[in-house]
Amino acid sequence: MCRIRTCSVSVCHSLRAATLEILSAKSSVLGFARRIWVISFAVAAMALMAYVVLEHQATLAAIDLTRPWLLLVAAAFHGTFWLAGVVSWRNLVRVTASRTLSLSESHHQLSLVAVGKYIPGKVSGFLARGAALKKFDMSTREILAASFVEQWAMLMSAGLVSGVILLLIRPNGTLTALGFAAIVSSLLGNHFFRFFVSVFQRVLSRVSDSNATQVGMPLGHHQYFLLLLMHSLTWILLGSVLVSIYFAFSTQPVSLKLSAALVLANIVGFLVGFAAIFAPGGLGVREAVTATVLIPYIPLEQAATLSIVFRVWITSIDALLASGLVWQTALARLRSRK
């Protein structure tokens, strides 16, 4: 009897050791894959930045800054935009999945998405962020739900800000009516959201455990309006970067109407560029749309130049984020060896 018990204990220890060895090997493989993933993001972002600069170096060299100090204002707006995005994503994960991310972790996950868009298909960044969220024991359902809510809030807030701008600048009767409809749709967005959630949950039930938590969906009205306002703030801040860059090299006097048109052009350009799935970072698409929206307000040459300068600005920021990701990956690798 004792011999049998001794053998059983020995077998259990062997199984446990084998299981730990398998898990360790799996963790090593996943860690290696994650490092390759991050490095590929960084290479893609830096390659695109180099391409944009070389392709438009003549245009960039011809720019004459009239208010260079506004570039510092643009940098301040961009930093505030990024901080607002980090706080917004942190809040969104808490609302949808009852998980609390640190600000540094939220920054890391947004960096993955920002840099991952340079891989054609634009899902790489979301997949990388999903892998990072797995560390917080989030199910597939919760990860997909958080991403779904994020995209919905981004779309509805874009409609809200664009609608307010269209009512402000009143380009024509049709666009003014469209602006009013956009505002109403965004304010009623939670009701539309609840309908799409029911469809979304049925899809999720096929890829995840049907008994999984419903991740706090549908959102309460207070939660929805908080997300709507936070994402609206990010659109305004990013548009303010474009406004600051334009007036940094333009001789035109600063005006509220032109500034509002610049913010609107930025929103439309980003949305259409994001929808162009196989254009890395919306390259070419975003610039063309932004310039087209601005034609009624500034000369075509200025609109084209501004779009190019803003592309270089955004890509340079993303290249810095990519460098940060590589640095974090290298540090994690060094710590794992100790």
Image (cartoon, grey):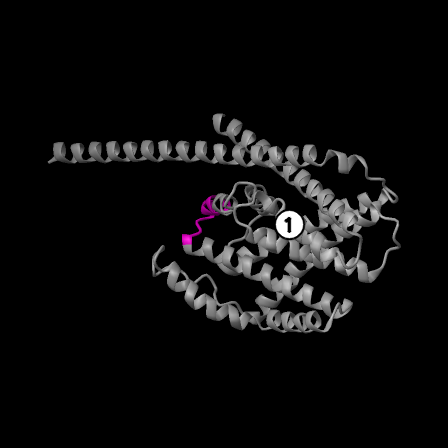
Q: Amino acid at mark 1?
A: Arg
Q: Considering only vertical position in the picture, is 27 above or below 69? A: above
Q: Which residue is more in the foreground, 259 or 291?
A: 291
Answer with left or right where residue 190 lies relative to residue 26. right
Whether residue 98 is visible: no
- In the rendered image, residue 247, in percent from the top left (x then y), is placed at 83, 49
Say which residue appears at 60% left-offset and 55% top-offset: 272
Q: Considering only vertical position in the picture, is 23 above or below 98? A: above
Say which residue appears at 44% left-offset and 51% top-offset: 138
Q: Considering only vertical position in the picture, is 176 above or below 123? A: below
Answer with left or right where residue 24 lies relative to residue 245. left
- In the rendered image, residue 97, in percent from the top left (x then y), is placed at 48, 57
Circle 1: element type? helix
Residue 131 belongs to magenta span: yes
Residue 91 belongs to magenta span: no
**Quick one: which residue is furthest to the left in this view?**
1
- In the rendered image, residue 117, in percent from the top left (x then y), is placed at 56, 44
Q: Considering only vertical position in the picture, is 244 above or below 155? A: above
Answer with left or right where residue 282 lies relative to residue 31. right
Within-10-Å neighbours for mark 1: few <14, some 14–19, many 20+: many
Q: What range is drawn magenta here? A: 129-140
Majority SS type along the magenta span: helix
Q: Quadrant of residue 104?
A: top right
Q: Which residue is more in the foreground, 97 or 268?
A: 268
- Give the residue at mark 1: 286
**Quick one: which residue is furthest to the front in this view?**
300
Q: Which residue is more in the foreground, 119 or 84?
A: 119
